[in-house]
Amino acid sequence: MPTEREDQRADLLVIEKEVHLVVRSEGPELKVERKWGHDWYVGTDSVCGVFGYQRHVGVEFWRGTSLPDPTHLLEGTGKNLRHVTLHSVADVRSPAFHALVRAAISIDRDSPKRPR
């Protein structure tokens, strides 16, 4: 019988898989690259990274400060990065999360790579 921790990890893997499905469906042209120990979706520049944590799945948006966020899902105070914390598949399937992913991909398509 699985432990509570194993059940939680299994749930997080389902959430992480759902995030990958959303990003792939919204941006089929994006490639996955391993950067900083995590999967990042890349177009002309980095778009978003998917991070599995102990109690949630995080999605980092490389140009997060440029994204419209009317529902205030984005967190963080970095120069460019912003992240979303996801605790359930329902969070991943929300229209607000899909809109952030679409906006991030659109910015990548329409804007040249930012200098670092």
Image: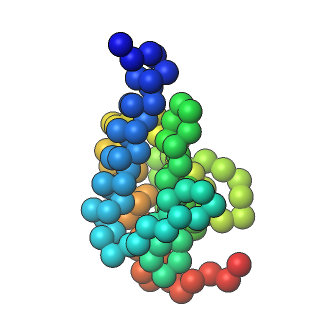
**Split into 4 quadrants, where in the image is the C terminus?**
bottom right
| Residue at the front extreme, as displayed | 1
Q: Quadrant of residue 78?
A: bottom right
Q: Quadrant of the N terminus?
A: top left
51 displayed left or right of 80 = left
**Residue 22 percent location from the top left of the image:** 32, 55
Instruction: Give me the residue at 53% from left, 64% from top.
Output: 34
The reply to whether residue 22 is visible in this rendering is yes
* Residue 67 in sight here: no
Residue 93 at x, y = what percent?
A: 31, 44
Q: Nearer the viewer, residue 94 or 58?
A: 58
Image: 89 above or below 34: above
Q: Please name the residue shown 49% across and 68% down the image.
A: 33
Task: Please tell me which residue is depicted at 45% across the width and 77% down the height of the picture.
Answer: 43
Specify whether 35 is left or right of 102. right
Q: Could you say where residue 113 lies in the image, as x and y percent from the top left?
A: 57, 83
Q: Is residue 16 above or below residue 80?
A: above
The quadrant holding residue 88 is top left
Residue placed furthest toward the bottom:
112
